[in-house]
Amino acid sequence: MRIRIAIAILLIMTIPLAAQRRSRDVEHVTFIHEIADKEYVTFGDAVRFFVLILGKEQESLFWKNVDILKAAGITRGLDYQENTTARKGMIAALIADYLKLGDSLFYLIFRTERYAFRACIAHGIMDYDASEWDRISGGELIEIMSKVSERASGGKE
Amino acid sequence: MKRTTIPIIVISIIFICSYAFSEIRVSSVRGSVLYKTGRDWKSLKQGMKLQEGTKISTGARSSAIIQIDNHKLTVRQLTMMKISRNRVSKESSNTRIGLKYGRLNARVKRIKTLKTSFKVITPVATSSVRGTEEEIFYGSKTGMRVWVLDGAVELGNPFIASRFIRGHSPSRAVFQLKTGEIKPQKLLSVVRNASFVRIYSNNITDDEKSFHEIAGDELFDNSDGAIEFLDLFLGGGASIVTIEVYWP
């Protein structure tokens, strides 16, 4: 009898956990589907995507997601508002800080979005036929983040 | 019982048996991977059997391995794909995968007695694997990229003549067709780009070489005097040398 009660308690405890996990997976992938369909993404979208790349749980509040990035060592380029249209330079600044792309002298000296963007081009993360002022589509953000995630994991993803 | 009933039943049994080998099974799942057959997305689990028309989508740091009959398909992270068709009969095997975005690895096993067709279709081109292994990427900006790791792959779309690429791991030949372009890039463009190296003057020191490695061509000058060096900042000091390199 005791064993049955223990099993029942265990089941009661694990079912909500499994359901929670499933709902997180759905939320995670649904977010990527929404991004894929966007003509242009916002800075808030990019920050949320970065949280996923870090393997952390997304928060509903923008500033909480920003805090997750800060805790992961991304400290530059986080001063924009959530609804600001994302430019390639903004995303490049986050990437350069996360991947420690410090092999461009001008980026090392000035730490600007312009040279962060150039550093991303040099590492094959972004395309050379663009500018740091270009807006970024959802499809492009997925491509870029995929490369960032691959690099961060040493090509094991 | 009508005369036609028995032949219909026999033909139906033969037809069903001939397609009974077709099986799509999930070998492994890592991270957040969802599938969709009807309206809703559901979590993909190891050991699940899937049907034709199933869409699969992976999240960040996630992947899935799908066994399609004898073929192995690895769905890498941040990918959306659909198993459009999978038909197997005694004579042939026919599989179509639609790749909306992301990256796949297809290892196609060719059986001599079976006519095998395994195609990965992206918005810009179709890759037809012929008993081999290939890595396929599609993104809205980059377009389609195919690395042939083993065997041969036929690539094409209605606007370009079909191309066969043979490869081995690590792959050197990369098929790339950008979105909106008709002509694919040169197969050895990756090798070509990797072949361009920095060259130094014989007169520079090791420290200067290191500086060049860090600074790249942003702040580097071979001129002898300070005036020429300053000219670099005024926009007139650098020399332009035109080099023509011919690739096969």
Image: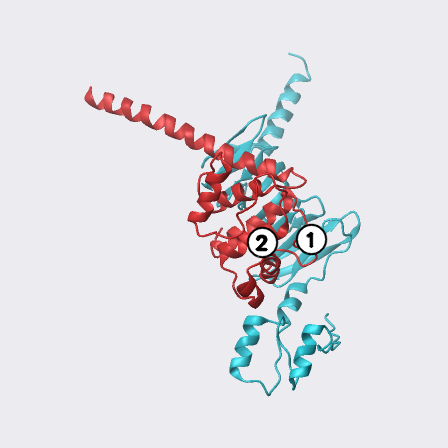
Q: Residue furthest right?
A: B159
Q: Residue furthest left?
A: A2
Residue B47: give x, y in percent of width and height.
Answer: 45, 36
State the separation of the CA atoms marked 1 and 2.
Answer: 36 Å
Q: Which residue is mark 1?
A: B154
Q: Which residue is mark 2?
A: A92
Residue sitting nearer the eye, B242 or B221: B221
Task: Name the residue: 66% across, 21% down.
Answer: B8
Q: Residue furthest top?
A: B1
Q: Is residue A56 left or right of residue B13?
A: left
Q: Residues within 10 Å of mark 2 (few under 14, many from 20)?
A: many
Number of callouts = 2
- The chain that appears cyan in the image is B
Residue sitting nearer the eye, A104 or B177: A104
Q: Please, what secondary structure does the residue beneath circle 2 have?
A: helix
Instruction: For chain A, give the colour.
Output: red
Task: Name the residue: 69% across, 17% down.
Answer: B4
Q: Quadrant of residue B223?
A: bottom right
